[in-house]
Image: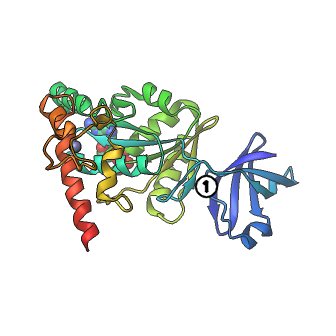
């Protein structure tokens, strides 16, 4: 029988199958080969007891990606949730998060929450700045339940990791998403608050058939870990149609004849995204020197 691992604690895995959730251990062969089953793994299980819902994981399907934090396999989408106001959005942090996911080959969509608190002009400016980043951008309000159907559309049929600063409204949005499809909202909130305090094992929340959310525990700051300064610009979708700088490679920061810089001047690349790029580039360059 096939299924997806949705939880793993102390060598015991919960596998979501068409016949409900099975509690499984992994065959010894995986330990011998140093393969650790991960949340998100699509697996084959041998049923030990159908009525007690117990089984053994006998095969792990090939992973198409593996996210490091949280350690989850086969992530279809990273949904980044930021508030437009309360807390004030830190766009450098947002841009670092986008970079980190794109580097790990995980598609990114952005959801700007608390639309009800922000002025229309600011919301429009933010949408304009991110319109070309390479994924979908939505403004929503968990409070008014506005835009939630659109979010549901984005995540449908996917394994989604949700991340963003604490206070942005991640739990509120996840609760809105769960409300219609699952009646046990209480259980969801309970799962959420438990997940919040245990950074060690994250848990998948089944939102709908074949739709799963992993809530990333809130973070204070977000640092880039692997991407080198000279690689950063590859992950800017906005820069892609403005290549052909005079110097190669070009860092797009100080070089004369830089096509990216002239595109910024002509208003074809948002100034804010570019300024943050330069900031992140300098930071990455400094980190490399130490
Ligand atoms: P999390 O830390 O990202 O999970 O954020 P929460 O979901 O706990 O929300 C933080 C605070 O913002 C709570 O007091 C929510 O009631 C409030 N909040 C969440 N979404 C909205 C929204 O769309 N509008 C407003 N005005 N407040 C919201
Ligand atoms: Zn350049």
Q: Horizontal placement of 203 versus 231: left or right?
A: right
The quarter of the picture where residue 55 lies is bottom right
**Which element carries disc 1, helix, strand or loop?**
loop
Figure label count: 1
**Residue 70 to residue 254: above or below:** below
Q: Residue 152, image x and y in percent?
A: 49, 30
**Label 1: how many Cα within 10 Å (few below 14, some 14–19, many 20+):** many
Q: Is residue 167 visible?
A: no
Pick whichever, 120 or 134, lies toward us.
Answer: 134
Q: Horizontal placement of 233 versus 3: left or right?
A: left
Q: Is residue 149 visible?
A: yes
Residue occupying the point 44% across, 53% down = 216
Residue occupying the point 22% across, 66% down = 286
Q: Residue 136, image x and y in percent?
A: 39, 31
Q: Residue 245, image x and y in percent?
A: 23, 40
Q: Which residue is mark 1?
A: 39
Residue occupying the point 63% across, 61% down = 8
Q: Horizontal placement of 193 versus 53: left or right?
A: left
Pick whichever, 92 or 83, lies toward us.
Answer: 92
Q: Quadrant of ligand 1?
A: top left
**Residue 248 to residue 55: above or below:** above
Q: Is mark 1 within 8 Å of ligand 1?
A: no
């Amino acid at each position: 029988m096939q299924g997806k691992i949705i939880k793993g604690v102390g060598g015991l895995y919960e596998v979501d199958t068409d016949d409900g959730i099975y509690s499984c251990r992994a065959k010894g062969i995986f330990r011998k080969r140093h393969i650790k089953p991960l949340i998100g793994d699509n697996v084959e299980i041998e049923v030990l007891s159908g009525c007690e819902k117990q089984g053994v994981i006998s095969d792990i399907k090939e992973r198409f990606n593996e996210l490091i934090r949280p350690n989850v396999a086969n992530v279809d989408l990273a949904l980044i949730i930021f508030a437009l106001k309360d807390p004030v959005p830190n766009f450098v942090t947002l841009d670092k998060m986008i970079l980190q996911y794109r580097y790990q080959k995980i598609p990114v969509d952005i959801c700007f929450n608390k639309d009800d608190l922000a002025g229309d002009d600011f919301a429009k400016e933010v949408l304009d700045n991110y319109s070309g980043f390479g994924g979908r951008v939505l403004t929503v309000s968990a409070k008014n339940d506005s835009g939630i159907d659109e979010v549901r559309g984005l995540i449908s049929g996917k394994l989604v990791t949700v991340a963003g600063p604490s206070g942005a409204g991640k739990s509120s949005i996840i609760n809105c998403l769960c409300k219609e499809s699952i009646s046990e909202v209480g259980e969801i909130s309970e799962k959420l608050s438990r997940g919040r305090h245990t950074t060690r094992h994250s848990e998948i929340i089944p939102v709908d058939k074949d739709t799963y959310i992993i809530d990333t525990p809130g973070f204070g700051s977000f640092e880039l870990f692997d991407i080198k300064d000279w690689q950063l610009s590859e992950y800017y979708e906005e820069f892609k149609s403005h290549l052909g700088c005079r110097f190669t490679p070009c860092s797009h920061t100080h070089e004369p004849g830089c096509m990216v810089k002239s595109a910024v001047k002509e208003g074809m690349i948002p100034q804010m995204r570019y300024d943050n790029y330069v900031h992140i580039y300098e930071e990455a360059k400094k980190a490399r020197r130490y």
